[in-house]
Amino acid sequence: MKDPLGLELSGADEVSHASYQKALAGLQCFTGDPVFEVEQAIASRPDFVMAHVLKGYLFALSTEASATSVAREIFATVRHLPASGREARHVAALGALCAGNWHEAGRGLAALSADHPRDALALQAGHQIDFFTGSSAMLRDRIASALPAWDDGMPGYHAILGMHAFGLEETGDYRGAEVAGRRAVELEPRDGWAHHAVAHVMEMECRQRDGIAWMRDNLDNWSKDSFLKVHNWWHLALYHYELGEADEVLSLYDGPIYGDRSTLALNMLDASAILWRLYLGGVDVGDRWQALADNWQAAKPGGHYAFNDMHAAMAFVGAGRSAELDRLLAAQEAAIEGQGDNAAFTRDVGRPATLAVIAFGQGDYGAAIRHLKPIRAIAHRFGGSHAQRDVLELTLVEAALRAGDRDLAGRLTSQRHQLRPHSPLSGLLVKRSAGIASA
């Protein structure tokens, strides 16, 4: 049978197809339980190739080692099922992901999208790969290339607009990004990714009050039954952080960001990122590091995805877990010698970033500077967004200030103030830098 956009679905029937479409729609909005829905499709028709592929992507794109093991089992099954040429290319992309070859998977899906621009899952999976590999231009161009084949009468068009909005934001077209993101949310108010794209615009443009209003005015749409909600709460916390409202940040941390002490890497990452920012500002976060470090420790980070490793290191530094830091560094050493793209992610950025975090925690600010300065221009190579990677810049600024490096602190704080002239945090950092110069 064919889906509503004319794509052949091998092995599907009406019942399994309905479950598959619910799973895909859930993924496009980041709502509901896509894994449950796609498992219903597979239970109904075990030879439904794209249902297996969708489930495989859901696990392979989680950035967790245990989930990748599940994805490998799915790949081992689906590779033997009858498939069309388009579906076989999806299977190959899933196999590349399972082998840790992120860039290969991304290229394969880009080629597939060129031939089948209405393949929404290819665009969705490819977009997530671009995010996890820090490929800003492809975040934009992968979707832009397919846009002419879409219109607002097609199911899932909101998701195409939302992904394009995020790509435009990551490449600096903030006006275009906000227009596309707001339109996507108009079409589908539950689209958490589109909502998040607009949040990114307001973060990058230092429009904290606008950002708080954007999040608060649409709270139910992006926070209820959403597996992106923690990250969107994190964005709200960032606005308050820039405004110097540490109490509000801690309230958000203790509530929707990490009140339930999630063990998912993507949620622990956000928790580490906001606590580290507070730590840089000298805010006492009490024993919050300990519970977070416990969960990172149980997850056994290291060697799977370098971006996660750095955030685990923040928690271990905050909690004083030297043994866990040693294990993390040993795992990174092994990863650098291993196969797959994470070897380069770790070698180029993840390892020096982790060493910088450790050095900062030890009060060796000169070493933190030495590790961070060379990676400023290449930090995108280990994934994440500009807003997420800003924690590296903030750490470098704070290290320069604490080291009393007048020239470096002056340059860095001036650069930041030019980008964020209305940010109280930027103003504070400039004043501290000037204090060094006049000492």
Image (cartoon, rainbow, N blue to C red):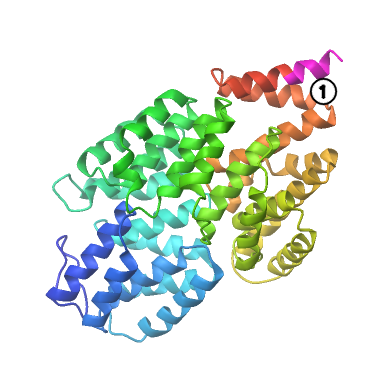
- In the rendered image, the residue lying farthest to the bottom is 80
Disc 1: CA contacts within 10 A as few (<14), some (14-19) or many (>=20): some
- Residue 377 visible: no
Residue beneath the point at 41% across and 35% down: 199
Q: In the picture, residue 180 is in which quadrant?
A: top left
Query: Residue 9: percent from the left, percent from the top?
Result: 21, 73
- In the displayed structure, would residue 206 be above or below residue 226? above
User: Main SS type for the magenta part?
Assistant: helix
Q: How many badges with numbers are in the image?
A: 1
- In the rendered image, the residue lying farthest to the top is 438
Whether 435 is among the magenta residues is: yes
Residue beneath the point at 76% across and 47% down: 356
- In the displayed structure, would residue 43 be above or below residue 418? below
Residue beneath the point at 27% across and 56% down: 117
Q: In the picture, residue 48 is in which quadrant?
A: bottom left
- In the displayed structure, would residue 225 be above or below residue 277? below
In front: 236, or 427? 236
* Quarter placement of the N terminus: bottom left
- In the rendered image, the residue lying farthest to the right is 439
Q: Which residue is mark 1?
A: 406
Left or right, residue 185 beside residue 360: left
Q: In the picture, residue 321 is in which quadrant?
A: bottom right
Left or right, residue 106 beside residue 214: right
Query: Residue 424: percent from the left, percent from the top?
Result: 59, 20
Query: Residue 268: percent from the left, percent from the top?
Result: 55, 54
Left or right, residue 346 beside residue 12: right
In front: 229, or 100? 229
- Determine whether the residue tagged by mark 1 lies in a helix, strand or loop: helix
- In the displayed structure, would residue 115 be above or below residue 163? below
State which region is magenta. 432-439
Q: Amino acid at mark 1?
A: Arg
- Residue 291 visible: yes
